[in-house]
Image: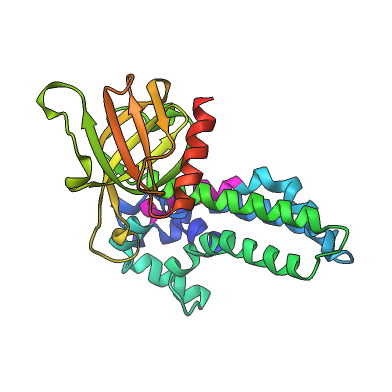
């Protein structure tokens, strides 16, 4: 892909096949695939080869390189931009010519998906290895490597949702790390004016997608898109946010093990949040507590 497509975009002999709108868009189309390739070629592959005789110890190798695996997050975040560009120019003569020269059965987009598939395969590999390494010397490292890779996958997944937020005025990066995201039923109770509501349960909840950052929690409304691939991915229109410095939490709401409360400015605004399951609620309550303490 890097030699047969990316490099060809800079080849003067191919320039006449590239439409002007596609020129200078190499970084968008290929993201940081070159960085991923060099990491594997120069570093990770060599490290793995050291474990050919001791496969059960390979967890160590993952742990040593774990920081580098974050390059996948960058790749996945760019993927929607790359796909949208590809859709515009997929029938371009330039791509057809590159594919013909390489004698590839599949078109470029199938190969651009490979890094996304690769990062999800590692956890399956590590799970399988763990299954057969229960009492081995490297079992703990394998477990830790698996946990770390799952952490990277969660970060990738969360950030894919985060880049779909629309209508937020500020800079999301200033809100600190994205810790959790998910969909909930939300009821609100404002103590201001006439809108004080006695019995919240009678009112229909709002469907909200929450993004918990270190400094704020964002409430968004999910919009399902029609289309294929990433176009089918939902977008989230920003509604409002609460500064975590002024948030309080009530862990149990009577009558429902899936509900908890977030309140703001000394209960001036109360948000009753219903998670899909008690487990999801517990995870969120724990994360919010960590932020608050």
Magenta-colored stretch includes residue 96: no
What secondary structure is the stretch in magenta mostly built from? helix
Q: Is residue 115 left or right of residue 82?
A: right
- In the rendered image of this protein, does residue 148 appear above or below residue 115? above
Q: Is residue 221 left or right of residue 229?
A: left
Q: Nearer the viewer, residue 72 or 289?
A: 289
Q: Nearer the viewer, residue 79 or 211?
A: 211
The image position of residue 248, as x and y in percent, is 40, 26
Q: Tell me what residue is drawn at x 25 percent, y 57 percent.
A: 224
The image position of residue 50, as x and y in percent, is 85, 58
Instruction: Identify the image quadrant of the C terminus.
Output: top right
Q: Tell me what residue is drawn at x 44 percent, y 46 percent.
A: 281
**Number of marks in picture:** 0
The image position of residue 120, as x and y in percent, is 56, 61
Q: Nearer the viewer, residue 100 or 219?
A: 219
Q: What is the magenta range?
A: 70-82
């Amino acid at each position: 892909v890097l030699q047969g497509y990316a490099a060809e975009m800079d080849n003067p002999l191919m320039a006449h096949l590239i439409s002007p709108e596609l020129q200078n868009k190499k970084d968008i189309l290929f993201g940081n695939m070159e960085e991923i390739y060099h990491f594997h070629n120069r570093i990770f592959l060599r490290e793995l080869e050291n474990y050919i005789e001791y496969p059960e110890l390979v967890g160590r190798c993952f742990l040593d390189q774990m920081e580098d695996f974050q390059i996948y997050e960058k790749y996945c975040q760019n993927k929607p931009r790359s796909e949208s560009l590809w859709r515009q120019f997929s029938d371009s003569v330039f791509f057809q010519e590159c594919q013909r020269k390489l004698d590839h059965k599949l078109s470029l987009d199938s190969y651009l998906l490979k890094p996304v598939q690769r990062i999800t395969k590692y956890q399956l590999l590590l799970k399988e290895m763990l299954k057969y390494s229960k009492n081995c010397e490297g079992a703990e490292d394998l477990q830790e490597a698996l946990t770390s890779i799952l952490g990277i996958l969660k970060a990738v997944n969360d950030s894919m949702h985060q880049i779909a937020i629309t209508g937020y005025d500020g800079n999301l990066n200033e809100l600190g790390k994205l810790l959790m995201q998910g969909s909930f039923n939300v009821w609100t109770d404002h103590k201001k004016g006439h809108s004080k509501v006695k019995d919240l349960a009678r009112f229909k909840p709002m469907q909200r997608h929450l993004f918990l950052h270190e400094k704020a929690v964002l409430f968004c409304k999910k919009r399902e898109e029609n289309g294929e691939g990433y176009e089918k991915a939902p977008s989230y229109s920003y509604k409002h946010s609460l500064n975590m410095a002024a948030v309080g939490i009530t862990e149990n709401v009577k009558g429902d093990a899936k509900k908890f409360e977030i309140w703001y400015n000394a209960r001036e605004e109360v948000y009753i949040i219903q998670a899909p399951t008690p487990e999801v609620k517990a995870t969120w309550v724990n994360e919010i507590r960590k932020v608050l303490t």
